[in-house]
Amino acid sequence: MRSNDVESKLRLVYPRQAEVDEEHVSVLAPAGAALLGLRVGDRIDWPLAGKKTLSLKIIRVTHAN
């Protein structure tokens, strides 16, 4: 995922696994739910505190076994 020209890696997980580290996002969290169903090339704008917006673009999707 690329946000504001910075590439980040996130893994969507079930809530129990989300506590492992900050690269894990629960599918039930607002950010996780917003990412569900997106495909490579899709973009979303994520509102942050202070009227800032984080623009996200999906650049790669992998599936863990």
Image (cartoon, rainbow, N blue to C red):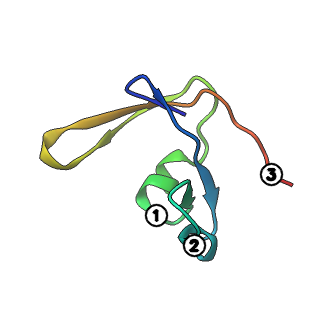
How far apart in space, not on screen, are marks 2 and 3 (Cα)? 16 Å
Q: Position of residue 64 (x, y in %)?
A: 80, 51
Q: Which residue is mark 2?
A: 15
Residue 21 vs residue 18, the one in the foreground: 21
Q: Measure the alpha-carbon separation of dots 1 and 2.
A: 8 Å
Residue 20 in the image: above or below residue 58: below
Most extreme residue toward the front is 21
Q: Label 3 vs label 1: CA separation?
A: 20 Å
Where residue 58 sits, quadrant-wise, is top right
Residue pointed to by mark 1: 29
> Whole-percent x and y of residue 30?
42, 58
Taking depth in this image into account, of 21 and 12 the one nearest to the observer is 21
Secondary element at image label 1: loop
Asked if disc 3 and disc 1 are in contact, CB closer than 8 Å, the reply is no
From the viewer's perspective, is 61 left or right of 8? right
What amino acid type should be assigned to the residue bearing mark 3?
A: Ala
> If the image is split into quadrants, where does the N terminus sit?
top right
- Which callout, 3 or 1, points at the residue further toward the start of the chain? 1
Q: Residues within 10 Å of mark 2 (few under 14, many from 20)?
A: few
Mark 1 surroundings: few (<14), some (14-19) or many (≥20) residues within 10 A:
some
Residue at figure coordinates x 55%, y 53% from the top left: 23
What amino acid is found at the position of numbered circle 2 in the picture? Pro
Q: Earlier in the sequence, mark 2 or mark 3?
A: 2
The answer to which quarter of the image holds residue 54 is: top left
Residue wearing tag 3: 64
Amino acid type, label 1:
Ala
The secondary structure type at the circle numbered 3 is loop
Decide which of tag 1 and tag 2 comes sooner along the chain. Answer: 2
Tag nearer the camera, 3 or 1: 3
